[in-house]
Image (tube, rainbow, N blue to C red):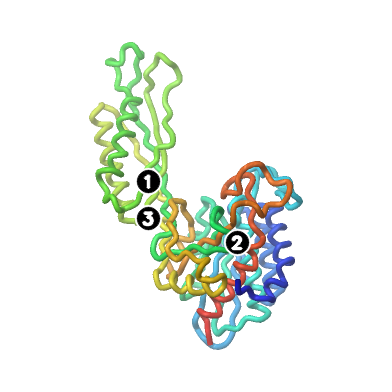
Amino acid sequence: MNLIPEIEASHEEIRTLRRTIHAHPELRYEEVGTAKLVAESLEKWGITVHRGLGKTGVVGVLKRGTSGKAIGLRADMDALPIQELNDFEHRSTHAGRMHACGHDGHTAMLLGAAKHLAERGNFDGTVVFIFQPAEEGGAGARAMIEDGLFQRFPVDAVFGIHNWPGMPAGHFGVTEGPIMASSNEFRITVRGTGSHAALPHNGHDPVFTAVQIANGLQSIITRSKKPLDTAVLSITQIHAGDAMNVVPDQAWLGGTVRTFTVETLDLIETRMRKIVEATAAAYDCQVDFHFHRNYPPTINDPEQARFAAEVMSDVVGIDKVDDSVEPTMGAEDFSFMLLEKPGCYAFLGNGDGGHREHGHGAGPCMLHNASYDFNDDLLSVGSTYWVRLVERFLAY
């Protein structure tokens, strides 16, 4: 690896920041303490700080030279409502809250880069450090954008990164085009007429109707969309009734839809509505169909993805960079930023969990798992990547 020596020398300081954040996790839009730590660290290094974007977001601005070119670097700060099973020294001190997705590491890596760039940065232009709240279901990226993020701090491109368990530690994964899916939820309420279970002809059965709807929805995936257009439609809940001998008045079912393109998502939502309404009508039931679009697909700009892969190769070696990594059906609200600006989102391997200290939980070191912990060996790798990205993007 070609890591920056000064960043490696600061490893203990950045690791302490990471573990402090891990020990004090805060949920979406509650990242007051984390934001304070971030802002005070940036100010200590001489970086101009702006607080309160998207409620608890922090933006740092560092300018060198005379160029009008600017680059945005983003890290997420929020934790998850999970009770941590780890028992090592830096475990969560807040019951029911935990950094189980590595946002503590993402924040620390960007802080490490900010420190180095403030002290020794060799670039011509402006770096915008974006510390975002509420990635976990709160659309914090959208909130910051609506608060004027890119109007107040214009950038030519924006970049993000996420640690990735299962990928060898220190390896990078990136791809042109879609890298993460859209996230969407639906709820379908079927209203019929209840009856005695022995006399179903006296009513209109919402349970039977809901089952037919569930079967019909799967035809969208197999018969309505192109086979090459990846999508998932999962019904995860069906609820109805309270008694074994009563056909209830109402049933509901819900679930999620994931796609890599908005066009495929539009098709699925349209077909869902038609199938739901027509099936309910066929069985003399009424229906309410609600479809909520959470996060759009995360789609990398091809040029910026290629640029990022070149920088990654310089840092860790070309053999440790997968520039056509398999996209995931998970979702990420960095997608909102990529709708506004060209850029690239990438994965940084977190390893297989062998890095965890004595006292870790019995579960796997996977995202959103109560036994997860970020791999501190990645701190210098991630910080070096950010610095080299800036230096090449804003080269003199």
> In the image, is residue 303 above or below residue 210?
below
Can residue 330 be spotted in the picture? yes
**Vertical placement of 57 versus 218: above or below?**
below
Residue drawn at point x = 66 percent, y = 81 percent:
120
Mark 1 sits on what residue? 232
Alpha carbon separation for disc pair 2 and 1: 28 Å
In the rendered image, residue 221, in percent from the top left (x then y), is placed at 30, 44
Is residue 26 depicted above or below 196 in this figure?
below
Q: Secondary structure at mark 1?
A: strand
- The residue tagged 3 is 260
Identify the element where label 3 is drawn. loop
Of the residues under marks 3 and 1, which one precedes in the sequence? 1
Q: In the rendering, which numbered label is found on residue 282?
A: none
How many neighbours does mark 3 have within 10 angstroms: few (below 14), some (14-19), or many (20 or more)? many
**Which one is in front, 211 or 199?**
211
Query: Image check: 260 left or right of 225?
Result: right
Of the residues shown, which amino acid type is indicated by label 3? Phe
Seen in the image, is 322 located left or right of residue 24? left
Q: Position of residue 245 (x, y in %)?
A: 40, 13
Residue 49 is drawn in which quadrant? bottom right
**Spatial distance from mark 2 to mark 3, Cα to Cα?**
24 Å
Image quadrant in which the N terminus is located = bottom right
In the rendered structure, are the residues bearing label 2 and label 1 in contact, judged by CB atoms less than 8 Å apart?
no
- Label 2 belongs to which residue? 106
Seen in the picture, residue 175 relative to 356 is either above or below; the reply is below
Identify the residue shown where x is 50% and y is 70%.
Answer: 318
x, y percent for residue 45: 70, 75
